[in-house]
Amino acid sequence: MMRKTNKSSQGRQKIPIAKIAKRTNLQVTFSKRRSGLFKKASELCTLCGVEVAIIVFSPAKKPYSFGHPEVDSLLDRFLARNPNFNISLADSSLQLGKAHKNASAHELNMQLTRISNQVEGERKRGESLDKMSKASECWWENPVDELGLDELQILKAAMEDLKKNVNDQANRIWLESSNTTTGNNSAPFFVMNNAHHLFESSPSSDQVGSGSIIIPSAYDIGFAGNIGLF
Amino acid sequence: MMRKTNKSSQGRQKIPIAKIAKRTNLQVTFSKRRSGLFKKASELCTLCGVEVAIIVFSPAKKPYSFGHPEVDSLLDRFLARNPNFNISLADSSLQLGKAHKNASAHELNMQLTRISNQVEGERKRGESLDKMSKASECWWENPVDELGLDELQILKAAMEDLKKNVNDQANRIWLESSNTTTGNNSAPFFVMNNAHHLFESSPSSDQVGSGSIIIPSAYDIGFAGNIGLF
DNA sequence: ATGTCTATGATTAGGTG
DNA sequence: ACACCTAATCATAGACA
């Protein structure tokens, strides 16, 4: 087989538009894309002769800005200056404009606020879970997308280990609960199965999927199916 | 030889970054590039979790804006940073504010679009975590023996969810590593399997393990086996 | 003014220095 | 952090609807 390490570079990789998990990666991406954004803005200015102002707060809350014309230098002067706390004038001038919001905008704003809160909640929840996982080495909570083959293998092993325990326990419970019931003809049976069967149309749940294997023997149910990573 | 006028389109042409002369052309370019700019900003927001505000005046002086979380708060924070420049900024802030108000509907729509996408992404990623956390406070560390059927079911669902992610990721890696190899006749393949088979033999990672059962359907590999908790 | 299409130019993810 | 490199993804000019 050809070695896969033949190429000097894999080139640009497709990444999902979702928050980048790796800190270092995020930082690089932020820098690159911020530059790209400003360049695009600059081109828009030049090509169409329009005015554009952009404000960006970095992940570290550091402000960056682009502006043409003139806003640029003003904003840059802001940023060069440092943190201060006074809203007064600027705020009031903005408040003035706020009065002119029309109804449709208001409705959209309602929606936006609602969804925004929703997102924020999700995000925070995700963050706390992330911290929790990092604190206690809960591998399974880490973004799977970042794992390499090695880690995936370990993860797989761990999951299967856990799964075995789960199956054992399930079977145990089944036994306990069944020793009070009358002759049930079914055997203790607990099988982990294809996830896509859970949420998609599954022809029949006790039907062997293409390629899957049913292990009928009671008490001994693990991942039904074959083994092999690749 | 082929005629050079055979093509249905010449594709994108390189244009100088200078003011476009043709009015109609300029208008189209403005629309397209404004959309592109906002999209880039949106991606930057999502990817890096940062705050961005953009204000654009069209050639016809019509204001457009994009903002996350919203232009208002960003501008407020921005202007608040330097009380000394409040007055000189009043003009620009008024201008910007006016732009924002007039364009509020449009901008809010942009925000809605972006946030909706974000919600979708977050939701999907958060689902497995959610199940995990709901399952119990740290079920994975707890002795499985103490879990009841309900918890086991939840655990099962969570595991299968996670497993799906793992499989997807594995297939992705497989694809990436294999798109540099020549005519490999095997499909992307990753199967969770019995733990005891896992580490008996570890063939080279780009070698299909011998003895494993291949499920021919590519990209769709989960826990092989049937489903059903009792 | 916005959406579609195609071919092509521009951006950038992942490396490396 | 930044600049450079490669190869892939993405954006978009021009034409049309």
Image (cartoon, coloured by chain):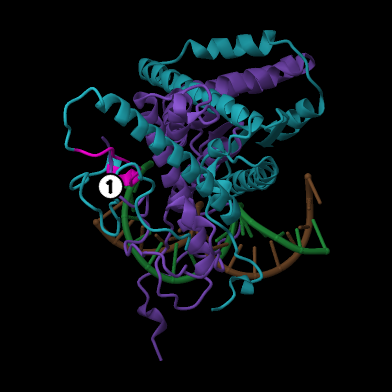
Chain colours: A cyan, B purple, C green, D brown
Chain of the residue under the numbered disc 1 shown in the image: B
The reply to whether residue B103 is in sight is no
Q: Position of residue B197 (x, y in %)?
A: 47, 57
- From this view, report whether residue B2 is shown above or below residue B153: below
- Rendered view: A103 above or below A162: above
Kindly identify the amino acid type of the residue bearing the numbered disc 1: Asn
Tally of numbered discs: 1
Answer with left or right where residue B51 lies relative to residue D10. right
Name the foreground residue: B229 vs A56: B229
In this rendering, position of residue A105 left or right of residue A47: left
Residue A20 covered by magenta stretch: no
* B146 or C17, nearer to the observer: B146
Q: Which residue is label 1 attached to?
A: B226
Q: Quadrant of residue A71?
A: top right
In which quadrant of the rendered image does the C terminus of chain B lie? Answer: top left
- Residue at the (26%, 26%) spot, across then down: A179
Q: Is residue A165 left or right of residue A49?
A: left
Give, as a single range, the part of the protein colored magenta: A186-197
Q: Residue furthest bottom?
A: B1
Report crowding for label 1: few under 14, some 14 to 19, many 20 or more residues within 10 A (C-alpha).
many
Picture coordinates of residue B170, whole percent (x, y): 49, 55
Indicate the quadrant containing the N terminus of chain B: top left, top right, bottom left or bottom right.
bottom left
Q: Residue at x 45, y 37 (%)?
A: A165
Q: As rendered, which of C10 and A203 lies closer to the eye?
A: A203
Q: Is mark 1 on a helix, strand or loop?
A: loop
Nearer to the camera, B55 or B174: B174
In this rendering, the answer to whether A203 lies above or below B217 is: above
The percent coordinates of residue A1 (x first, y second) are: 54, 79
What residue is shown at x 57% (from left), y 33% (from top)? B54
